[in-house]
Image (cartoon, rainbow, N blue to C red):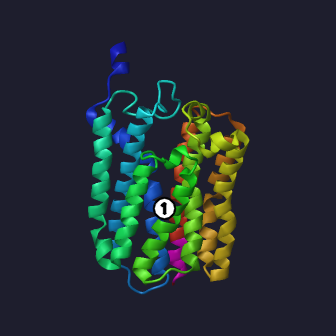
Amino acid sequence: MNHGSLTKKPTAAYSWLMATRPKTLPIAIVPMVVGTFLAQATVEHIEWLLMWSAIVSAVCIQIGTNLINDALDFKKGTDTSARIGPKRVTQSGLLTFDQVHSAGLLFFVLAIFAAIPLFLKGGIAILAIVMISTLCGYAYTGGPFPLSYLGLGELFLIIFYGFVATCTLYFLQTGYVDLRAVLASIQLGLLACVPIAINNLRDYEGDAKANKRTLAVRMGMCFATAEITFLILAPFVLNILWVTFGQMFAAVCPLLALPLALFLVQFVTKHNPGPIFNKFLALSVLLDLTFGILLSVGFYFGHF
């Protein structure tokens, strides 16, 4: 057996793919789809270009945020050889700090260009939203007050991957925002927080040593476990409210994802933080994607 092949260095292309963290990208896509399909249940005409433009822009912001996080977590000493999470390309030496940091900035620029159809439709307000989202993507790890180091990561996700993303798409298609859009945004925002909450519980000890004051570090492991349970189950409880809006399909369809949610809660609460949490991380993104698709299906069939 050629043991050298087992430690073969990944190609540059694969290293860049790892750096973008493709498994996290559905979190950026789901609110754009849900906001659009909710709008389709409300108005007769949908501009699909707006959804695709928003998806590309949001994915670019997500990739840019991931790359900046990869580079700056290494520079701050948070990512070390003792890391138990997925491999980070800067820390492992597959790519340099300058390469990853510059690529992150490039993706932020691409996000702004991808959003041009949104600016043309919504004007200065939408331009401001995209610019602020981009700046906050950098500020998640960078700047004098990095959000993830202050325990504000979950709040960031609820605001931008819940309310801002969902309601902005709904507004662009309908011209207004109502309580239905707010309800959907809260549900998606909570689910978007699950991966980061699992990530923070997994990295509890390393983050504490690096003075990364996540909610898990600030409040303790018991709180972090309870937080994950709440974030997973609350959207399903809120789903009952769709009945009050006459959206019976939307109230029922996402319940098909409940077994996955219960499975995830059971395993997170029964295991101590460790490498197995990487699997839970992937399942949490799958839960967000599944819930969003089923909610969109509910909106689609509910408008007939």
Query: Is residue 129 in the magenta section?
Result: no
Q: Residue 68: x and y, percent?
A: 38, 44
Position above or below: 72 against 6: below
Residue marked by disc 1: 160
Judge from the rendering whether residue 276 lies leftward or rightward of residue 96; answer left or right: right
Residue at x-position 55% and y-position 62%? 188
Report the label total.
1
| 268 and 253: which is toward the camera | 268
Residue at x-position 37% and y-position 33%? 89
Judge from the rendering whether residue 152 lies leftward or rightward of residue 19; answer left or right: right
Amino acid type shown at disc 1: Phe
Q: Specify start and end residues of the magenta stretch as a single range.
A: 297-303
Please, what is the dominant secondary structure of the magenta stretch?
A: helix
Give the structural element (helix, strand or loop) at label 1. Answer: helix
Q: Residue 108: x and y, percent?
A: 32, 54
Query: Is residue 301 in the magenta section?
Result: yes
Do we see residue 206 in this rendering?
yes
The image quadrant that residue 276 belongs to is top right
